[in-house]
Amino acid sequence: ILDLLYKIYQDNQVTLLCISHDLDVAEKYASHLGIIHQGALIESGEKRKILAHPQKTYTKELIQSFEEHKSFIKSGKPI
């Protein structure tokens, strides 16, 4: 369904707001990110800038956790 929504977004030049706990989804579909911690928006901006140069400690830890998760999945080790 996300691929369909993304196609509609691209074809019709509309705004699409997606709220997700999955950085894989955000990395694939988003142009901008907003990072929320304890109910407050702590960082927002272009996806590539936030992922490459996070400013807040929580954002850095979130991205590190995501990278570790991706590495574990790629390793093929059983859970």
Image (cartoon, grey):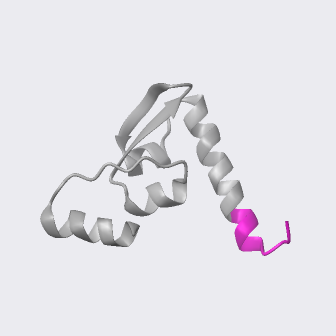
Q: Magenta part of the protein: which range?
A: 71-79
Q: Residue at x 17, y 56 (%)?
A: 14
Instruction: Please say whether residue 76 is one of the residues in the magenta stretch.
Output: yes
Q: Is residue 63 left or right of residue 31?
A: right
Where is 2 relative to 17, above or below? below
Q: Where is residue 78 in the image (x, y as percent from the top left)?
A: 85, 71
Q: Is residue 48 left or right of residue 39?
A: left
Q: Residue furthest front?
A: 1
Q: In this view, does 77 lie to the left or right of 19?
A: right
Q: Where is residue 59 in the image (x, y as percent from the top left)?
A: 55, 37
Q: Where is residue 42 in the image (x, y as percent from the top left)?
A: 46, 27
Using the rendered view, name the quadrant where residue 5 is placed: bottom left
* Quadrant assignment for the C terminus: bottom right
Q: Which residue is drawn at 54% across and 48% down?
A: 21
Using the rendered view, name the quadrant where residue 30 is placed: bottom left
* Quadrant assignment for the N terminus: bottom left
Q: In this view, does 19 lie to the left or right of 31?
A: right
Where is 20 relative to 59, above or below? below
Q: Where is residue 65 in the image (x, y as percent from the top left)?
A: 67, 48
Q: Which residue is drawn at 71% across and 55% down?
A: 68
Where is 68 relative to 56, above or below? below
